Amino acid sequence: MTTRRRFLLTTAGVLLAGSGGLIRAVAAGDPLGPWTAAPTALDPDPRLRALGWAVLAPNPHNRQPWLVRLSGTDSLLLFCDLDRRLPVTDPLDRQITIGLGAFAELFRMAAAAEGLAARIEPFPDGVPAQRLDARPVARITLGPGGVADPLFVAAPTRRSAKRPFDTARPVPAGALAALAAAVPAPLRFGAATTPETVAPLRDLAWAAWQTEAMTPEAHGESVALMRLGAAAVAAQPDGISVWGPGIEEMVARGELTRDAMAAPGRPGFQVMLDRYRAIFDATPAMVWITSPGSGHAAAFAAGQAWLRLNLAATAAGLSLHPISQALQEYPAMAPHYAAAQARLGEGGTVQMLGRLGTAPPVPPTPRWPAATRIVGA
C-alpha cells in the first residue's frame, strides 16, 4: 500500500486524500459516512453489519477492491473487483490481495464483537497461479462462538497518517511489544527504532518513493485516480480525493488539475516531493511484516496481519504510514525491491513496510458505502 493516498501541498494549502476505483455510481452524499454508519448499523443481517466495518479496512491506493456475494443465510463470497487493480505498480496483484486480507480480518473482528465466529477460507476454488481472476478470494461463514478481539476497539479511529512524526518521541518498548504480539505466526514482525537502524531503511524507502514519482506510468496511475473537489469526492469516494478548505475555488479557477501534478516541471510536482522529503525525514521508527513464502495466499495472510498491526498501533496511541514502494514488483523498482528483500526478508518475503511514530490526528479516508460492494448471484 503506497503513500500516494494522501499528501499535503502546504504552500498551496491543499490537502489531497486518497481512495481508488469504481463499480457503480451512487447518489452524492457524505464520503465519510461509512465511518459513522458502521458503529450504529442496525441491519438484522449480521453479515451486513460486519460488512459496514470491513469496508473501512486499509488497502492500496484505497482502491476498495472488494466485491461481496451473499450466500444462504450465514455465508458470503469475497471477490476482487478486477477493474480496481493497479496494473503498473502492482502487476502481480500482491498489494490488492493484501487489501482483501485486511477486509476479511476486519469483517472477522466485527462479527466476533457480536459473539459470532467468522470462518475464513482463502481461495476456496483454488489459488491463481498468476494474477487474481474471477474466482473468489475467500469464503466467509458465520457461526456461534465468536470471542471479541481487544484490537477491534481501535477500528473506528484507525488511520494511515501521511504526516511528519514527532522525532522527539521514541516508540515505547511496551507499544512495540504489543505490535509484535498482534502479528500471528508464521508471519514475522520486524522493527527498527534507533537512528542507526532507521536511517538506511528510510533512505531506501525514500529512493523507492522517488523512483515511483519519476516513472511516468507509475505516477500516472495515481494521477488518473484523482477526484478534484468536494462534489467529485462525494460522487466517487475513491481514487485520490482532493478536497478541503480553499480547494473548491482552486478547482473552479483551473489552478488545481491532474495535469499540474502529472510530471516534473509541472506546478505542484516539486512541492509534492519537498513535502514528502520532510515526511520521510521525520521518521522515528520503521516496521515491516514478512511471510515465510510468497504468492496470493501469503499476501492474503499478510493483509490480515497488517490490519491487526494497524489497530495495535492505533490502540497504543501511535501513527502508522505504509511506505511499501520498495516492495512493488515492476521493472523500474527492481533494484529497490532486491535491496529491501535482502535487508529484511531473512529468507521470506517482505510484504509491508511502514513508518511508525506519533503524529496529530488525521481525518478518515472517503469510502463507498458497504451496500455498493454487494453483487448479485
Image: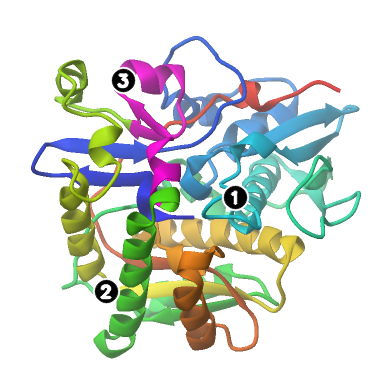
Q: Position of residue 279 (x, y in %)?
A: 23, 61
- Report how far apart the C-alphas of labels 1 and 2 lie in the structure: 26 Å
Location of residue 42 (image quadrant):
top right
Task: Tell me if label 3 and label 1 are in contact, CB under 8 Å.
Answer: no
The tag earlier along the polypeptide, 1 or 2, is 1
Q: Which residues are magenta?
A: 219-241
Q: Nearer the viewer, residue 318 or 365?
A: 365
Few, some or many C-alpha atoms within 10 Å of disc 1 (few <14, some 14-19, many ≥20)? many
Q: Is residue 152 above or below residue 173?
A: above
| Residue type marked 1 | Gly
Q: Nearer the viewer, residue 329 or 311?
A: 329
The structure residue drawn at horizontal position 51% and vertical position 83%, both measured from the top left corner, is: 344
Checking the image for residue 153, the label placed there is none
Q: As drawn, which residue projects farthest toward the top?
A: 27
**Residue designated by label 2:** 284
**Residue designated by label 1:** 99
Q: Position of residue 97 (x, y in %)?
A: 66, 53
Image position of 329 (left or right of 175) = right
Q: Circle 2 — which element?
A: loop
- Report how far apart the C-alphas of labels 3 and 1 lie in the structure: 25 Å
| Residue type marked 2 | Pro
The tag earlier along the polypeptide, 3 or 2, is 3
Q: Position of residue 356 (x, y in %)?
A: 35, 67
**Residue designated by label 3:** 230
The structure residue drawn at horizontal position 23% and vertical position 51%, both measured from the top left corner, is: 264
| Residue type marked 3 | Ala
Q: Is residue 64 above or below residue 162?
A: above
